[in-house]
Image (cartoon, rainbow, N blue to C red):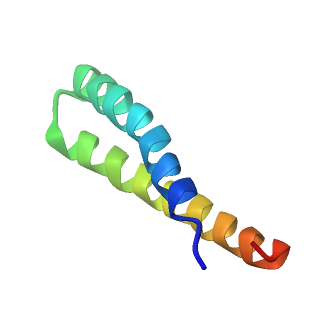
């Protein structure tokens, strides 16, 4: 069984750097390409963190 509450919590926590980082990248570069690249990198990092957390949860027997 998956830990859905933890996954959703991680997405909420990831939303803060997405919003702040997106605004910062827009301020620095003033191009949507930079913002989209930031969001893709952040999405990749969050998916890695969630995948590792799922593996640890399965090993612990939750």
Q: Quadrant of the C terminus?
A: bottom right
Using the rendered view, name the quadrant where residue 61 is placed.
Answer: bottom right
> Is 20 on the left or on the right of 23, as rendered?
right
Which of 4/18 is in front?
4
Count of labels in the image? 0
The percent coordinates of residue 28 (x first, y second) are: 29, 22
> Is 14 on the left or on the right of 25, as rendered?
right
Q: Residue furthest top?
A: 27
Q: Residue furthest right?
A: 60
The percent coordinates of residue 49 (x first, y second) are: 61, 59
Identify the residue shown where x is 36% and y is 38%.
Answer: 18
The percent coordinates of residue 4 (x first, y second) are: 51, 63
Which of 36/50 is in front?
50
User: Is residue 31 depicted above or below 5 in this figure?
Assistant: above
User: Is residue 24 depicted above or below 49 in this figure?
Assistant: above
Using the rendered view, name the quadrant where residue 34 is placed.
Answer: top left
Which of 5/45 is in front?
5
Q: Quadrant of the N terminus?
A: bottom right
Identify the residue shown where x is 30% and y is 33%.
Answer: 22
Identify the residue shown where x is 32% and y is 31%.
Answer: 19
> Is 49 on the left or on the right of 7, as rendered?
right
């Amino acid at each position: 069984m998956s830990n859905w509450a933890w996954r959703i919590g991680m997405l909420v926590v990831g939303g803060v750097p997405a919003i702040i980082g997106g605004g910062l990248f827009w301020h620095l570069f003033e191009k949507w390409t930079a913002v989209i690249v930031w969001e893709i990198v952040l999405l990749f990092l969050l998916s890695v963190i969630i995948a590792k957390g799922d593996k640890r949860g399965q090993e612990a027997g939750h």
